[in-house]
Image: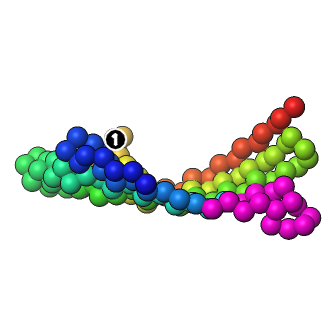
Amino acid sequence: MSGAPADRNLVDVYADGGVELIGLSNARPDDKFGIAAGYAHVSKRAQTLDADYARFVDPRWPVRSFEGLLTAVYQYQIKDGWTVQPNFQYIVHPGGGATAPASPLPGRALRNASVFGLRTTLKF
């Protein structure tokens, strides 16, 4: 968890945490499963800036609030020194509710996102 002065930082509060379980079964003692969550709060100063922009320039402009992250990962050991690791992330309010820069609709907030990934590691 961390905090920062709201008068000069976009994110004034951040927290994350997770848990990793190793050796869920006797047949796979080196495999790992992890879940985690993160939260970033957009400072009141930044929210006020967004509200002023919406009031004076574009009423469709969103006010950023927070970004949330949920993630799950499984590391499968194929053999000693070689692992494959699929992961999944779900992001709520990307950028705190920021707008899509390339959108044809200005002021439209980014949608929640699902991200799938795959990593492999070789150690020799």
Name the side, left or right, on which 114 lies relative to 119.
Answer: left
Q: Where is residue 68 in the image (x, y as percent from the top left)?
A: 43, 59
Amino acid found under the numbered disc labelled 1 = Pro
Is residue 31 found inside the magenta-colored segment of the image? yes
- Evaluate whether residue 61 shows in this view: no
Q: Position of residue 28 (x, y in %)?
A: 88, 61
Q: Which residue appears at 25% of the width and 52% of the height?
A: 43
Q: Which residue appears at 90% of the width and 44% of the height?
A: 80
Determine which quarter of the picture holds residue 66.
bottom left
Residue at numbered disc 1: 101
Question: Residue extending furthest top?
Answer: 124
Name the side, left or right, on which 86 lies relative to 49.
Answer: right
Question: Residue extending furthest left?
Answer: 56
In this picture, which residue range is highlighted in magenta? 19-33
Picture layout, residue 37 above or below residue 81: below
Q: Point out the image quarter for the C terminus.
A: top right
Q: Position of residue 114 (x, y in %)?
A: 54, 57
Determine which quarter of the picture holds residue 8.
top left
